[in-house]
Image (tube, rainbow, N blue to C red):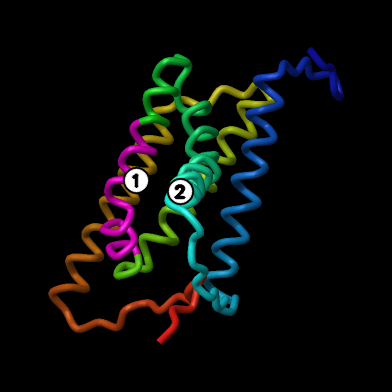
């Protein structure tokens, strides 16, 4: 237990607070990059062995699921639910990574929406780390409402001939 500016902060509070800051920072950087940044060109490297490739995939899944772990910590109080959520999300990520990537790249507004969700969750984690309880129903409602609005927008864009939003890609594909 640490006392800072009159607040008694436990390890969980510090994790929530720092995790919230991390999500806010990372999401803001990604949104800024999508809107203003330049694509980076990455040259493919050949893997030396199958074991190396598998290790790299597992390592990257763990790194990329860090925000999912922080999100799970902030959204539920039961540790077993957090563990199950992370395991399921990694399994889904590994099984459907290609299809999800193509779908998200085809609908760039979903990228911004997902990053906005991470900002919302980051803010929630931050304030919960400071002992302000945020009812989860508000967060769930905001997420599902926004997603519903985006689904309606996607259907309207599909039926109409309105221009699509073009975001700067994170990685430039080699031609």
Residue 57 or residue 79, whichever sits in front: 57
Residue 97 or residue 49, whichever sits in front: 49
- Whether residue 137 is in magenta: the answer is no
Mark 1 neighbour density, 10 Å: few (under 14) some (14–19) many (20 or more): few
> Residue at left 47%, top 16%?
79
Mark 1 or 2: in front is: 2
Q: At which x and y percent is residue 4?
A: 85, 23
Picture quarter with the C terminus: bottom left
Q: At which x and y percent is residue 168?
A: 49, 77
Q: At which x and y percent is residue 116?
A: 48, 53
Q: Which residue is mark 2?
A: 57
Q: Earlier in the sequence, mark 1 or mark 2?
A: 2
Q: Are marks 1 and 2 in contact (CB under 8 Å)?
A: yes
- Residue 91's place in the image compared with 80, above or below, is below
> Residue at left 49%, top 67%?
46
Mark 2 neighbour density, 10 Å: few (under 14) some (14–19) many (20 or more): few
Give the alpha-carbon distance from disc 1 to disc 2, as whole Å.
9 Å
In this image, 126 relative to 171: left or right? right
In this picture, which residue range is highlighted in magenta? 88-104
Q: Which residue is mark 1?
A: 94
- Whether residue 93 is in magenta: the answer is yes
> Residue at left 39%, top 42%?
142
């Amino acid at each position: 237990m640490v006392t800072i500016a009159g607040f008694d902060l436990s390890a969980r509070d510090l994790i929530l607070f720092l995790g919230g800051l991390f999500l806010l920072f990372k999401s803001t950087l990604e949104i800024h990059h999508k809107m203003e940044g330049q694509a980076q060109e990455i040259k493919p490297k050949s893997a030396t062995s199958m074991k190396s490739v598998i290790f790299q995939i597992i390592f990257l899944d763990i790194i990329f699921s860090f925000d999912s772990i922080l999100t799970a910590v902030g959204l539920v109080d039961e540790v077993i639910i957090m563990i199950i959520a992370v395991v399921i999300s990694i399994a889904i990520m590994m099984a459907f990574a290609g299809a999800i990537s193509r779908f998200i790249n085809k609908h760039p507004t979903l990228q911004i929406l997902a990053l906005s969700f991470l900002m919302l969750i980051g803010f929630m984690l931050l304030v919960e780390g400071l002992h302000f309880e945020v009812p989860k129903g508000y967060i769930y409602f905001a997420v599902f409402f926004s997603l519903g609005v985006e689904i309606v927008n996607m259907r309207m864009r599909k039926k109409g001939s309105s221009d699509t939003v073009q975001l700067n890609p994170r990685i430039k594909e080699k031609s």
